[in-house]
Image (tube, rainbow, N blue to C red):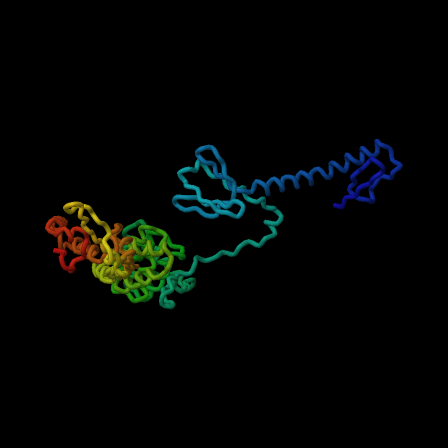
Amino acid sequence: MRFAIADRGADISVCPDASTRAPFSQSATERRVAWGECRQECLPHLLALLLLLCAAVQAEDTITLKDGRTISGTIVKEDEESVFISQNGEQRGIAKSRIEKIDPKPAAPVDPKAAAAEPKPKTVMPAPAALIVQKPGAPEPIVMDLRSSGALIDKVRELGLPDPKARKTAQAEISAKKDEYMPAMLGMLHPKFDSDEFTRIGILRLLAANAPLTEVGSRMLAFVAIHDPHPEVRREACVTIRTLADDDAIRELMRFCQVEDATTKKAVAVALHEIDDKRLLASIIRAIPAPSVTANQGEPTGLDQPKYNLPVGPGGTKLPIWLPAQEVSGVATDIDSPAADLLKLIAKKDLGNMPYSWLNWFREKIGDISQAERDTYKEKRSLRGRMGTPPGDSGSQ
């Protein structure tokens, strides 16, 4: 709709179109009638524009704190402890313990005509399953398409049925054709595949019953132990690795420790704590380097003349006191190591970065020494030994 303004002196009339503009010779009554008709046509459009402006201004998330204050902005992310909100290009974190409620921004209005005109999305099949057959060091496996294995997938899903008889029947049938069902079972363990928690646990238990696994199966166990979204599935994968004493799976877990992502490292430490492989713990302790200090000594001073002259002799004779000094500086190396940091996460305790401290912890863990024996050993140590001198150094006993 076009608009035109007809001006005659101080009288201004807004008309829907210039072609319908009243002549300058029309009376005041006619102009008022024309203005009223124009206002009735323009008012709905003005109201719609005003509502859009208000929606644009209020399209923000609002956080109400327990002290009554409100914070408006855009919530960018949220974790277990804090909510991060963006204001004027800057982000700030707010502890959830301070938040009373969160009012998300209203959804944008949807035009019914535009929604009807949009094509309906096609039915998407579940995300394809995955097998870990990729370049060494890459944590994400390649994807194996199982869309053509619908019958196999349906049979594997029966491993998660609540009926014990139905589960046993499915286990017997799948075990009889293990080679045929193995790719489907490994693929359905991938977190991107649409399978429920009970089906995944049933697959893991069936894999343990049909050991030994191939290298692909072992690497998939390690992947599930870290990346599965269900805690019980991750725990079941760790139990399977511990039961089978699967070296390939443990080796794959250690490869994940080489990534820089702190979340992945923590997940690996939780899995290794659950697996509790004594051989792996001994290897990690052996990899902790012993710290060393390099001393740099400067030139001695205070030898050319006495530092003090004390009048303590007979007849006021002064006694010279020499206090030689020498500047000593040193550089410590190997005071920290990735192996010690990983052990702190696995053991869920901080015993420092000394290898002998972790060795005593390991000996107590495997039953080589007891807590009472350790206490007795501490009491019999010399003063220098109690001050923390490493074993093997002279004077430690």
Residue 388 appears left or right of 171: left
- Residue furthest toward the bottom? 135
Is residue 220 or residue 69 the one in the foreground?
69
Residue in view at x 38 percent, y 54 percent: 195
In terms of image quadrants, where is residue 354? bottom left
Asked whether residue 310 is in view, the answer is yes
> Which residue is at the far top?
29
- Answer left or right for 80 relative to 374: right
What number of labels is visible? 0
> Residue 352: horizontal and vertical position, in percent?
25, 53
Find residue 215 and report its horizontal and vertical position in percent.
30, 67
The residue lying at 43 percent from left, 38 percent from top is 99
The C terminus is located in which quarter? Answer: bottom left
Q: Residue extending furthest right?
A: 25
Q: Position of residue 345 (x, y in %)?
A: 29, 53
Front-lying residue, 178 or 239 = 239
Which quadrant is the N terminus positioned in?
top right
Please, is residue 358 above or below residue 46 in the view? below
Residue drawn at (80%, 33%) of the image = 33
Name of the residue lying farthest toward the front: 315
Question: Can see residue 276?
Answer: no
In this rendering, is residue 238 above or below 85? below
Left or right of 172 on screen, residue 67: right
Spot occupied by residue 122 in the image (x, y as percentages of width and height): 52, 56
Residue 151 occupies quadrant: bottom left
